[in-house]
Amino acid sequence: MHASFGQPTGTRDRAAFVLRKLESAGWHTAEIYSDYKQFVILNNYVIRILEIQDKTR
């Protein structure tokens, strides 16, 4: 369920929100296969940025 300010409140909603934001920014693409599984493909520079953020966290 979404909060009144448009921010997702549940874990699944937050994950979907982040994925939509990253996709709209061109950070990843998604492929959907015939069995309806969705695979997220991160660009190489995105992987590096996320690794750096994780280390500094």
Image: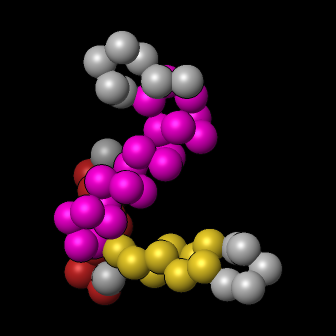
Indicate whether residue 22 is drawn in magenta.
yes
Q: Is residue 39 left or right of residue 34?
A: left
Q: Residue furthest right?
A: 35
Up-down relation of residue 8 to residue 4 (above or below) = below
Q: Residue furthest top?
A: 4
The N terminus lies in which quarter of the figure?
A: top right
The image position of residue 11, as x and y in percent, is 57, 35
Judged by its main secondary structure, the magenta piece is helix
Residue at horizontal 78 percent and vertical 80 percent from the top: 35
Give the quarter of the image for residue 32: bottom right
Residue at horizontal 33 percent and vertical 26 percent from the top: 6
Q: Is residue 30 left or right of residue 55?
A: right
Residue at horizontal 31 percent and vertical 46 percent from the top: 57
Give the quarter of the image for residue 45: bottom left
On the question of residue 53 being in view, the answer is: yes
Up-down relation of residue 35 to residue 19 (above or below) = below
- Numbered disc total: 0
On the question of residue 49 being in view, the answer is: no
Indicate whether residue 42 is drawn in magenta.
no
Q: Is residue 11 left or right of residue 17?
A: right
The image position of residue 13, as x and y in percent, is 53, 37
Up-down relation of residue 17 to residue 29 (above or below) = above
The image position of residue 55, as x and y in percent, is 33, 58
Q: Which residues are magenta?
A: 8-27
Residue at horizontal 41 percent and vertical 57 percent from the top: 19
